[in-house]
Image (cartoon, rainbow, N blue to C red):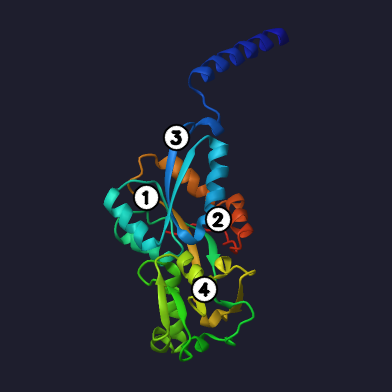
Amino acid sequence: MKRSILSVLAVFAILLAIICSAGCIAEDQKYDGKSLLVYSGAGLKGPMAEIGQVFGDKYNVTVDLTYGGSGVLISQMATTKLGDIFIPGGEPDYQNAVAKGLVSAEYQPVAYHVPVIAVAKGNPYGITTVEDLAKPGLRVALGDVNATAIGKASVVIFTKAGVLDAVEKNVVLRGATINEVVTALSTGNADAAVLTLDSANQDLFTTIEIPVTENSILVTPIGVTTFTTQPELAQAFADFVASDEGKAIFEKYGFPGYPDAKYT
């Protein structure tokens, strides 16, 4: 009887192997050879480039990343209706894409973007508060309000402090990406800037924290486009970015990780 049962199990195992050889695909092989197009905020380039490589190696997938200011990326998506994933620098830009019907209303928060004041090493102009950016003659670089999450956050911060109009008089550059703002400050074309903590290179700049009550802390969201032709793969990538492994890569690049959650 025992030998009979073993024989049946052996036959079952052989049949299962035959079936799987024809149709079963290992979990890490199910996306072999496919490609993803990801629209990513320019300020997320460090962690997203590494995540794209890790995910691509794990599933034998090509991850093509297009970086830019969120406003530009939204325009590209609206024009081409191509691509699979959108991950901007902040929730307002994601909600803008939702309103345009470009991305799913369901998204996952990945990391915090924390605005800080950045100045040349040594803080030669003695900047200590947001109000100091209104000092006459100071040259200030900011992100474009319509193109970047940090630009939108800056408006909120200055409005809270009651210095929006005064700071506006000092603005010498509004970058289409946060990287342009970093460049303006690092090359001496601006005296101060509002950057995110992760983008403010501590070797080049002195940073001044903005108190939480005066700040406009951004949350980086990720979601799937409404026109993706491979929703399962797109969702798998979004889930990976929002996983502990993905968040650890963000933290490696200076982004505080966001607690587990899914928003709709």
Residue type pointed to by label 3:
Lys
- Whether the residues at callouts 4 and 1 have beta carbons within 8 Å, the answer is no
Instruction: Measuring from the top left, give residue 119's x and y in whole percent.
Output: 56, 78
> Which numbered disc flags the more N-terminal residue, 2 or 1?
2
The residue tagged with tag 3: helix, strand or loop?
loop
> Which numbered disc flags the more N-terminal residue, 4 or 2?
2
The residue drawn where x is 46% and y is 59% is: 42
Q: Mark 4 and mark 3: span between their CA atoms? A: 40 Å
Which label belongs to residue 241?
none
Q: Mark 1 and mark 3: span between their CA atoms? A: 17 Å
Report which residue position mark 1 lands on.
Answer: 225
Front one among 67 and 14 = 67
The residue tagged with tag 4: helix, strand or loop?
helix
- Whether the residues at callouts 2 and 1 have beta carbons within 8 Å, the answer is no
- Whether the residues at callouts 3 and 2 have beta carbons within 8 Å, the answer is no
Residue 238 vertical placement versus 112 (above, below)? above
Instruction: Measuring from the top left, give residue 11's x and y in whole percent.
Output: 61, 10
Instruction: Measuring from the top left, give residue 13's x and y in whole percent.
Output: 61, 16
Residue depth check, mark 4 versus mark 2: number of the one nearer the observer: 4
Which label belongs to residue 185?
4
Instruction: Give the crowd class for mark 1: few <14, some 14-19, many >=20 residues within 10 Å.
Output: many
Report which residue position mark 2 lands on.
Answer: 46
> Which numbered disc flags the more N-terminal residue, 3 or 2?
3
Report which residue position mark 3 lands on.
Answer: 34
Q: Quadrant of residue 263?
A: bottom left
The residue drawn where x is 55% and y is 48% is: 51
The residue tagged with tag 1: helix, strand or loop?
loop
